[in-house]
Image (cartoon, rainbow, N blue to C red):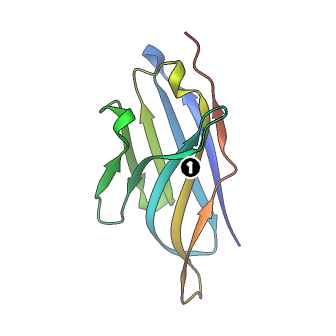
Amino acid sequence: HVQLKESAAVQSGGSLRLSCKASGDIFSVNAMAWYRRGPGKQRDLVASLTSNGDTSYADFTKARFTIYRSDAKNATYLQMNSLNPGGTADYYCTANLYGSGSLAEYDYWGPGTRVTVSS
């Protein structure tokens, strides 16, 4: 059984770091990504990161966000700087991974963590 769990930590200067850790019977993790859904909006891809280290960002991140991962911890992180109220949303992490003993890879999602940015 595999689970993903997000958490958030406020940092100095108004930055926020989201963390997501996958736990359970995991053999290997492929791509990991962050999505968000703002109030009344559709879910959008924020950033993704492959196992090879290739990254992709949504235009709205405007070089303010950084995605990185720790393979040792089966975790991914999203560093968000210069946040504005437009960043208010539920943030979800997802991981494409092989479970132990599995012959196929599956996508797993965390329950999400709410980020509220005040003006």
Relative to residue 58, is residue 72 depicted above or below? Answer: below
The quarter in which the C terminus is drawn is: top right
Relative to residue 45, is residue 16 depicted above or below? Answer: above
Looking at the picture, how far across and down is residue 2, in whole percent?
66, 68
Counting the numbered discs, the total is: 1
| Residue furthest top in the image | 119
At mark 1, the secondary structure is strand
Q: Quadrant of residue 118?
A: top right
Looking at the picture, how far across and down is residue 55, in whole percent?
31, 53
How would you rate the neighbour count of disc 1 (Cα within 10 Å): few for under 14, some for 14-19, many for 20 or more? many
> On the picture, is 18 further left or further right than 54?
right
Tag 1 residue: 20
Relative to residue 46, is residue 97 depicted above or below? Answer: below
Name the residue: 54% across, 19% down: 85
Given the image, on which type of amino acid does mark 1 rest? Answer: Cys
> On the picture, is 42 further left or further right than 31?
right
Q: Quadrant of residue 114?
A: top right
The quarter in which the N terminus is drawn is: bottom right
Name the residue: 38% across, 48% down: 68
Name the residue: 50% across, 48% down: 34
Looking at the picture, how far across and down is residue 46, in whole percent?
45, 44
Relative to residue 62, is residue 68 depicted above or below? Answer: below
Looking at the picture, how far across and down is residue 67, in whole percent?
39, 45
> On the picture, is 17 further left or further right than 54?
right
Q: Return the residue nearer the eye: 36 or 31.
A: 36
Name the residue: 47% across, 54% down: 33
